[in-house]
Image (cartoon, grey):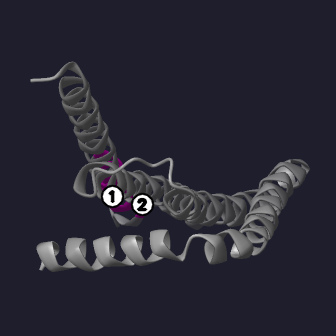
Amino acid sequence: MRPVKFIEKLFTLGYLLIVALFFISGVGLIVLAGIETWGALSPGAELNVRQRFELVLECIGLLTIAVASLELGQTVLEEEVQRSVNISAPTRVRRFLSRFLIVVVVSLSIECLIGVFQFVHGKPQYLPHAAAIGLAAAAILATWGMFIRMNVDAEKLEPHAMHRTQAEDAQVEENDS
């Protein structure tokens, strides 16, 4: 086996390990959220409504991070293992970055809402912290939109790469079925 092929196999193994850890982390967070939800909604627990509400909000936060973990694992699996192509192609970079930023923006937006709900009645002095998270999500979304808009011309310069990527998508979807 050539050294380059061996190194590529090591990278694939590394990506598979990352995917497995993202999956295990996501499932672990789902289990923790389930336990927390049970504790929050259990009629036998001596908690007032506000405490139950805060526990449910914590569950939503855990589930948000679990979704991000699972989504990132799936992205790595699809882009680095199943397609096993070089990510240096501009079309692939834009796509990978878009998938990653979707997860980040949605996660930050949900965390902002959770922060607002938690702090609006109990600790209003922390509302600016939650607002900062919301502003960060908005800034990321706006700059991502600018990035996509500015790359329309790049897509026109490399139509063959887009066609190849779409063909790979169809093949991966066919293999998944």
Q: Nearer the viewer, mark 2 or mark 1?
A: 1
Report the span colored magenta: 28-40
Q: Given the image, on which type of amino acid does mark 2 rest?
A: Val
Q: Position of residue 132 (x, y in %)?
A: 85, 53
Residue 60 horizontal/vertical position (percent): 50, 62
**Which residue shows up at 58% across the image and 64% down it?**
98
Q: Residue 10, percent across and down?
A: 22, 27
Up-down relation of residue 130 to residue 110 (above or below):
above
In the picture, measured across the screen, residue 158 lies left or right of residue 126, that is left
Q: Is residue 48 magenta?
A: no
Q: Residues within 10 Å of mark 2 (few under 14, many from 20)?
A: many
Instruction: Check residue 31 for magenta coloring.
Output: yes
Q: Quadrant of the C terminus?
A: bottom left
Q: Residue at x 49, y 60 (%)?
A: 92
Query: Which percent across, then down, holds residue 147?
Result: 75, 64
Badge 1 local density, few (<14 within 10 Å), some, or many (20+)?
some
Residue at image mark 1: 74
